[in-house]
């Protein structure tokens, strides 16, 4: 049985023209050989599997060739080329610095440099993984690297250029190898497949190239693995099954569900993905990449950034036409936030599911869109709200005898919520078909919370006292007022509601919370300021310095209009004042606080002396 050779070794390039994806570097090396301008030290750096050591071997073989071709390649016929191909050349030495990284190993190398070549013009020393040399070994190598014999050439190869001493870098010509593109990798895999008599779908080779992440050696190793799994017929489905890659089909189906606002179906599809053994973090990063590819597909100028096969490219173009740009912006932001919070989350599945629900609600209300600056954090009900039943006409029972109501006090009741307007006798008429807040379904309340906000103000007419009309005596036996009568008895439009300090501060903080991301500094300053009500209509904000005062003053007309609208009072005025030095309150320490407390209660001193207490 013939010995099997892996594709990465069997199809290793032997000429500069056969190197994939490094055209600029190979052209530079060929021109240097053709003109005879060879440096004494080279540094090849770049990711793994992109051809650093391969180019070093081709370069060493070519410069020792006795009869190079017209295009600057080795002839493969002279004694030097034959010895190199048979791996018996004494002019080319390879050293693995990962296992030979001591000072003694470098000293042995320096001793070998003194011996001139027997066949050929140059002795080439290829030191792979040179960043693994110790600092002492680097220092022992400096003198020889700077002034070697005329026949000695050093080629250093590394994947971590930043670990090499600057004194070494300054003595070398540096060649930065780049990652091999997906198209170049797919073309080379197709060439290998044709040589081996293997049939492969382009989409399958594209998946292998993406999995290799720019490394040709990795791509060929994965290719051999998939060939062993499929038996010589590589298909897209068998490739994603063998490599455990999440299919594009899931992401296309999810995006269609997002656009149709089907949050429940997205959760079921995500559960199917988890049952196949995929990780939630892998899923959300793939979904973010899918949205990025959709965004790239919308503009012909950015279409070259889409690294997929021809069939998948057509599907991306078709779905990109259905996705609005604000949806893609906010979807990528949500997926990126989920990816950042995934490691810190304790309930990782719930985190991803919440993100999917938000994605499914992005196009539900276009009027609530934030212009692409960031997605809204609020979640809407997944199921459709139930329609309220039509009200049936029922006989109204006789109203009970009204009890006298106590007069409202001026001081607001403690609590985080603002005071609400008390119900008036005119509030009895039948409400609209939407229902009152007390009888409306919960889902309907959630969907209409934005437009049906309680006004935390106090209506002067609601107190039962009017300065324009005398209060009419209530008749308990009178029938319920009709809507027309209620509107006729409503307070005039020019009547302003009474306000209090707590309501003003409530809407002051609410305005700060609605400021965009560009005004986050102003929002934080507003949260630290408490408004003081000077009279019935004037409120004052006291700030620390003139800079903040100017910032608040510039925003005063907008804030003032916001307070007037929400408090139903057109006379509200906002004043900004810089605090005087005497108003600054110094923070007292523990000892000072205890002294102040003991002045009010001398028993504390007796307690301290009795038990020998001290402040730490």
Image: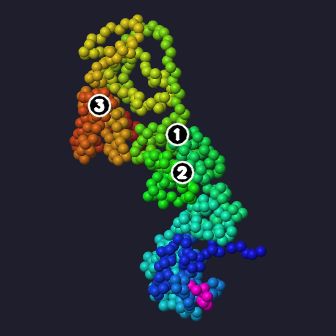
* 3D distance between C-alphas at marks 1 and 3: 37 Å
- Dot 1 or dot 2: first in sequence order is 1
**Residue 301, above or below 474:** below
Q: Quadrant of residue 78?
A: bottom right
Decide whether residue 75 is among the magenta residues: yes
* 3D distance between C-alphas at marks 1 and 2: 17 Å
Specify the color scheme: rainbow
For disc 2, the marked residue is 287
Decide whether residue 198 is among the magenta residues: no
**Residue 418, above or below 292:** above
- Neighbours of disc 1 within 10 Å: few (<14), some (14-19), many (20+): many
- Dot 1 or dot 3: first in sequence order is 1
Q: Residue sitting at 40 percent across and 45 percent down? A: 371
Residue 392: horizontal and vertical position, in percent? 50, 15
**Residue 151, above or below 217:** below
Q: Residue sitting at 46 percent across and 24 percent down? A: 434
Residue 564: horizontal and vertical position, in percent? 29, 31
Closer to us: 419 or 411: 419
- Neighbours of disc 2 within 10 Å: few (<14), some (14-19), many (20+): many
Q: Which residues are magenta?
A: 74-81
- Dot 2 or dot 3: first in sequence order is 2
**Residue 411, above or below 598:** above
For disc 3, the marked residue is 564
Q: Residue sitting at 47 percent across and 31 percent down? A: 446
For disc 1, the marked residue is 261
* 3D distance between C-alphas at marks 2 and 3: 45 Å
Element at badge 1? loop
Q: Residue sitting at 34 percent across and 34 percent down? A: 507
Residue reaching furthest to the right: 1
């Amino acid at each position: 049985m013939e010995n099997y050779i892996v594709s990465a070794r069997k199809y290793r390039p032997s000429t500069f023209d056969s190197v994939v994806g490094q055209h600029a570097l190979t052209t530079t090396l060929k021109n240097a050989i053709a003109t005879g301008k060879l440096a004494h030290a080279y540094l090849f750096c770049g990711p793994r599997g992109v051809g650093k050591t391969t180019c070093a071997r081709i370069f060493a073989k070519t410069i020792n060739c006795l009869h190079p071709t017209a295009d600057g390649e080795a002839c493969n016929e002279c004694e030097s080329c034959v010895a190199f191909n048979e791996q018996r050349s004494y002019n080319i030495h390879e050293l693995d610095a990962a296992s030979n990284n001591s000072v003694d190993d470098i000293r042995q190398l320096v001793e070998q440099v003194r011996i001139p070549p027997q066949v050929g013009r140059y002795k080439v020393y290829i030191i792979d993984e040179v960043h693994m040399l110790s600092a002492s070994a680097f220092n022992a190598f400096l003198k020889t690297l700077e002034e070697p014999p005329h026949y000695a050439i050093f080629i250093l190869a590394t994947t971590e250029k930043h670990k090499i001493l600057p004194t070494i870098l300054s003595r070398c010509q540096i060649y930065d190898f780049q990652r091999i593109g997906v198209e170049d990798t797919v073309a080379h895999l197709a060439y290998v497949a044709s040589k081996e008599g293997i049939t492969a779908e382009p989409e399958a080779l594209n998946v292998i190239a993406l999995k290799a992440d720019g490394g040709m050696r990795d791509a060929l190793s994965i290719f051999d693995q998939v060939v062993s799994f499929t038996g010589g017929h590589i298909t897209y489905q068998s490739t994603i099954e063998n490599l455990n890659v999440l299919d594009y089909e899931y992401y296309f189906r999810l995006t269609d569900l997002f656009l149709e606002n089907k949050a429940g179906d997205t959760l079921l599809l995500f559960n199917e993905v988890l049952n196949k053994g995929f990780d939630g973090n892998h899923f959300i990063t793939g979904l973010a990449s899918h949205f990025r590819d959709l965004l790239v597909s919308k503009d012909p100028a950015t279409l070259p950034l889409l690294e997929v096969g021809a069939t998948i490219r057509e599907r991306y173009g078709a779905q990109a036409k259905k996705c609005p740009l604000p949806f893609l912006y906010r979807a990528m932001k949500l997926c990126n936030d989920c990816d950042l919070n995934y490691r810190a989350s304790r309930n990782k599945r719930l985190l991803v599911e919440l993100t999917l629900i938000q994605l499914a609600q992005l196009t539900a209300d276009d009027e609530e869109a934030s212009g692409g600056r960031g997605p809204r954090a609020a979640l809407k009900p997944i199921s459709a709200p139930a329609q309220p039943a039509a009200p049936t006409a029922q006989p109204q029972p006789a109203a009970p005898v009204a009890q006298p109501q106590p007069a409202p006090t001026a001081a607001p009741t403690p609590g985080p919520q603002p005071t609400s307007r008390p119900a008036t006798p005119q509030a009895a008429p039948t409400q609209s078909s939407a229902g009152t807040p007390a009888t409306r379904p919960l889902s309907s309340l959630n969907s209409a919370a934005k437009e049906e906000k309680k006004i935390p103000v106090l209506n002067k007419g609601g107190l039962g006292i009017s300065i324009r009309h005398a209060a009419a005596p209530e008749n308990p036996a009178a029938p319920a007022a009709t809507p027309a009568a209620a509107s006729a008895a409503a307070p005039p439009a020019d009547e302003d509601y009474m306000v209090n300090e707590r309501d003003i501060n409530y809407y002051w903080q609410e305005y700060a919370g609605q400021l965009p991301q560009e005004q986050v500094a102003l929002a934080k300053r507003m949260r630290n300021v408490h408004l003081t009500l000077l009279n019935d209509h004037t409120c004052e904000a006291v700030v620390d310095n003139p800079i903040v005062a100017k910032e608040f003053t510039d925003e005063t007309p907008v804030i003032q209009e916001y307070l007037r609208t929400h408090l139903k009072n057109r006379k509200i005025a906002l004043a900004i004042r810089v605090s005087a030095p005497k108003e600054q309150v110094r923070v007292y320490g523990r000892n000072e606080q205890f002294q102040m407390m003991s002045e009010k209660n001398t028993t504390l001193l007796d307690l301290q002396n009795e038990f020998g207490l001290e402040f730490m």
